[in-house]
Image (tube, helix red, strand yellow):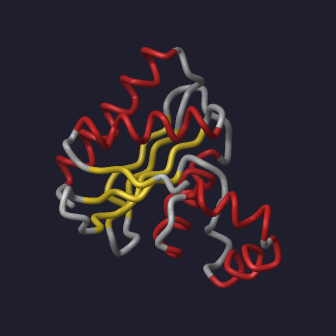
Amino acid sequence: MKLAVAQGMVEAARAHARQKGMNPLVIVVLDARGVLKVGIAEDGTSLRRADVATGKAHGALAMGLGSRTLHTRAQNQPYFIAAVTHAVGGSLVPVPGGVLIRTKEGELLGAIGISGDSSDNDEEAAMAGIAAVDLVGDPGS
């Protein structure tokens, strides 16, 4: 994923959040290897929001599933999610807001993680950011 694409995604997610009156957000974009491309923290975010946003994105990449699916799995298989979280060094947050980023052909480019508002709103902003750069978001189901 190109840096300019990741930056555009972040700016579009921020614009969507501001238009909707969401709380201040931390937005993290990781490439397909899990390497940070862009990370921002809006004024007024709480202390560890960046860790939460990163955990949402990293968890989605580590499992190949949007964090909404990981949330469902955590409810149905809490021991499994706890074990996976441990296996990935604690960087897995199984709540909505971690969305896989794909091309229209399905190629995995990375993941975006957002934290700061409700998990559903975090995911909504992520999807808006991805759509704005003409890519496909996979939040899970």
Report the front residue among 46 and 76.
76
Q: Please name the residue shown 42% across and 14% down the image.
A: 19
Report the front residue among 28 and 82.
82
Total marks placed? 0
Q: Is residue 81 left or right of residue 59?
A: right
Q: Is residue 115 left or right of residue 7?
A: right
> Where is residue 70 shown, x and y percent of the image?
63, 63
Instruction: Locate the C terminus and report the quarter of the image it occupies.
Output: bottom right
- Please determine whether, in this image, residue 93 is positioned above or below residue 7: below
- Please determine whether, in this image, residue 102 is positioned above or below residue 40: below
Q: Is residue 12 left or right of residue 126?
A: left
Instruction: Locate the N terminus and report the quarter of the image it occupies.
Output: bottom left
- Please determine whether, in this image, residue 25 is positioned above or below residue 57: above
> Where is residue 2 shown, x and y percent of the image?
17, 57
- Please determine whether, in this image, residue 5 is positioned above or below residue 124: below
Q: Please name the residue shown 61% across and 35% down the image.
A: 116
Report the front residue among 45 and 11.
11
* Residue 73 placement: quadrant: bottom right
Q: Please name the residue shown 67% across and 42% down the image.
A: 47
> Where is residue 56 shown, x and y percent of the image?
57, 57
Residue situated furthest right in the rendering = 79
> Where is residue 126 shown, x and y percent of the image?
43, 41
Q: Please name the residue shown 25% across and 65% down the image.
A: 106
Q: Is residue 121 left or right of residue 71?
A: left
Report the front residue among 30 and 73.
73
